Image: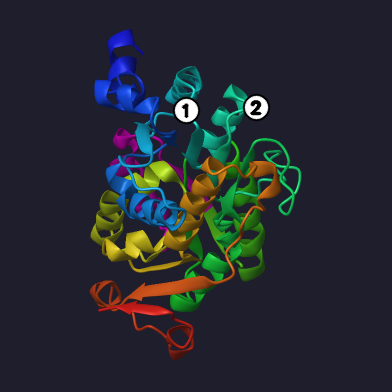
Amino acid sequence: MKRRDLITLLGSAAAWPLAARAQQAAMPVIGILGLGSRSAFDFALLAFAQGLRQQGFVKDRKVSIQYSWAEGHYDLLPSMAAEFVRRRVSVIVTFSAPATEEAAKATSTIPIVFEIGTDPVATGLVKSLNRPGGNLTGTTNMTVELAPKRLGLLHDLVPNVTKIGFLTNPDSQTAVPIVIKEEKEAAATLGIEVHEVAISSDRDFDPAFESLARLGVRALDVSNEPFHLSRRERIVALAARHGIPAIYSSSEYVKAGGLMSYAPSSTGLFVIVGDYAGRILKGEKPADLPVVQPNKYELVINLKAAKALSLDVPATVLARVDEVIE
């Protein structure tokens, strides 16, 4: 990648406003490192700000927040993390496991508060959930491990399906092997073939869905992937165009017109991330703040999308729904 392209994509991390630099001496600075795009995470940023306010921190009044969004370019994360370290931000907040891993490589002293979908103990980010140790803590929605549950719900809705597509991003080295293994094991018990479909750039979308059609795939599971989330409107539109029922790892897809999702309330977890960042700014240590897991998972279904796909939602599925979008 050319230097000028790198500088452009680094965004605010590469060219901070003069006002922010002047504020740095007067107030703490939080650096937010995201793999996706800012527009895709508006809901998360609102929840994060709520958590900060719980600890008495209001953006641009008691805390300065700077952002770096990789727009799905995994290769930019190391430079972005290093820039935050160079700027000596007070706390680094990460959205996604890859961003967290790069931040952890970049610093062992600046506190890092994460929101991820993988097991932070299994991936070596923390020593334990209750006592993380080191400079990292945060929340894990564990959506990577929900693949079998999503598959079961999809099978309940489309019981005659024999082939499903599983949308992944091969650039996400941490999560993909784990989630594919669990998806295939669960599918085998139902007699279903799983066809992995990789999308890691904008040019992959149309060919990926065309390949699903050629393979005769009649249902789709979309993994928890920041790049995909940032393109959720496109994914939802393509699934509708090809007449493929899909289950998603975030309710944000369903709000965008998707069929259904099974996931924890992500906004609640981002509130906790903001709360933790505020507590650390007030002097608490990440090593002493336990990693939070969701205690409730929500099934959300869009009846308008189901009607468009000519699907009759079974009463057994409706009985388990937490939110219906009509």
Q: Residue furthest front?
A: 26
Q: Residue at x 55, y 57 (%)?
A: 143
Hey, what amino acid is under mark 2? Ser
SS class of the residue under badge 2? loop
- Give whichever of discs 2 and 1 has the lower sequence position: 1
Q: Residue at x 44, y 90 (%)?
A: 315
Residue 232 versus residue 136 in the image, above or below = below
Residue 290 versus residue 208 in the image, above or below = below
CB atoms of marks 2 and 1 within 8 Å = no
Image quarter hosting the C terminus = bottom left
Looking at the image, can residue 68 be seen?
yes
Q: Which region of the structure is painted magenta?
A: 195-219
Looking at the image, can residue 222 be seen?
no
Mark on residue 89? 1
SS class of the residue under badge 1? loop
Mark on residue 70? none
Residue 34 versus residue 320 in the image, above or below = above
The span from disc 2 to disc 1 (Cα, nearest Å) is 13 Å
**Drawn side of residue 34 relative to residue 122, left or right:** left
Crowd tier of the residue under label 2, counting other residues whose Cα lies within 10 Å: few below 14, some 14–19, many 20 or above: few
280 or 44, which is in the foreground? 280
Hey, what amino acid is under mark 1? Val
Q: What percent of the width, then of the height, locates residue 65?
A: 36, 36
Image quarter hosting the N terminus = top left
Q: What percent of the width, then of the height, locates residue 252?
A: 35, 60
- Counting labels gives 2
